Amino acid sequence: MKVTRPGSTTASMGGGDGRYPSSPYGVFAYGKNAGQRRVRDQKHQVDIDTDDVPDTVDEAPYHTPDMANVLGIPDHQVTPAVEQAIGRLMVRINGLTENLSDLKKRQADLARNEGRDPFTGALSRPAFMQILENEMALVGTDRTSRMLLLCELSNLDEILQTYGQECKDGLFNYVRRTMADFIMSPHHLGYLGCNDFVALMYNVDEEDIWQRVDAITRWLDQHPYTHDGHPIMLEPVFGLHEAEKGDTSTTALNAADAALRAHKEMYFAQLARIPHGI
């Protein structure tokens, strides 16, 4: 069988030379008058041979007996009661599938948040100490240097006396976000509890770390956390320790804490020499 149809609206629009698309809707992509300028003479006709094209077959509707056949129930036994039972069963299966999907999503969320401190969003103390213990066992066996940086909010007690516990959550989360901006992956940032943050950093020298410390301090000074419209000024102090062969998680943390105490004494000694009121 042959079907004769008039030429398409693009027949006189380049003749397949690539300037225009084969789709008749493509003329609209070339402006409002693109089609009108080229459809005045449409005398060309095309014969299409459709003998080899199979006739379309309507798709068979989906019936409950199809489900019954899958379950091994003969067609002659599919009564209305069986249909209702199969329907209820399929609804139950769909519900269980959805519940399983939700459960998997929750498990994935728990896995992502495992080891995170819910108070600050940083690594929790147990998770960080486990990482630190693993890393201390590798000191001296590779060429990676490991620096432990300890941060203490020295005036936290004064802040809580003034503003109360209700400002603590937001304040600690703000400090964690600020530190995370300057201590990024693959370095680890953790919260040890009380008013102490800690970071484990790889292949960075002391000068690099103290530049980051200075940037964190200046940011907190220039952009203080606000509570009920009141800016809260923080006084962070830091201690740094480079891990050595033979260090454990405890000895490394104690060394960083000792460096922090020395830095804290020097910091308050400098404040004491500043004339009052300046």
Image (cartoon, rainbow, N blue to C red):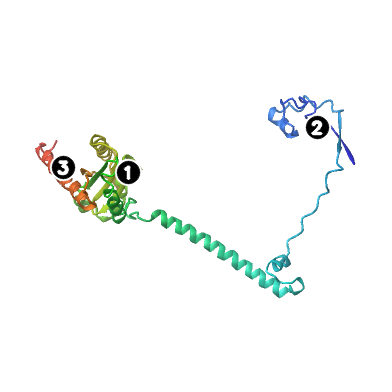
Against 22, is 194 above or below? below
Report the Cα–Cα distance between label 3 and label 1.
23 Å
Question: Measured from the top left, where is residue 195 in percent x and y?
Answer: 23, 51
Q: Is residue 13 left or right of residue 49?
A: left
Q: Which residue is mark 2?
A: 8
In the figure, is residue 264 to the left or right of 82?
left
Marking on residue 217: none
Q: Is residue 272 left or right of residue 30?
A: left
Question: Quick one: which residue is furthest to the front in this view?
Answer: 141
User: What is the quadrant of the N terminus in the image?
Assistant: top right
Mark 2 burial class by Cα count in 10 Å: few <14, some 14-19, many 20+: some
- Toward the right, the furthest residue is 1
Q: What residue did someone put label 1 on?
A: 187
Q: Secondary structure at mark 3?
A: helix
Q: Nearer the viewer, residue 107 or 162?
A: 107
Which amino acid, mark 1? His
Secondary structure of the residue carrying numbered label 1: loop
Position of the C terminus, as image quadrant, is top left
In this image, 72 relative to 168: left or right?
Answer: right
Mark 2 or mark 3, which has the lower sequence index?
Answer: 2
Q: Name the residue nearer the viewer: 132 or 112.
A: 132
Judge depth for marks 2 and 3 and give the one in front: 3
Q: Earlier in the sequence, mark 3 or mark 1?
A: 1
The percent coordinates of residue 136 (x first, y second) are: 26, 49
Residue at numbered disc 3: 263
Percent position of residue 197, x then y: 26, 48
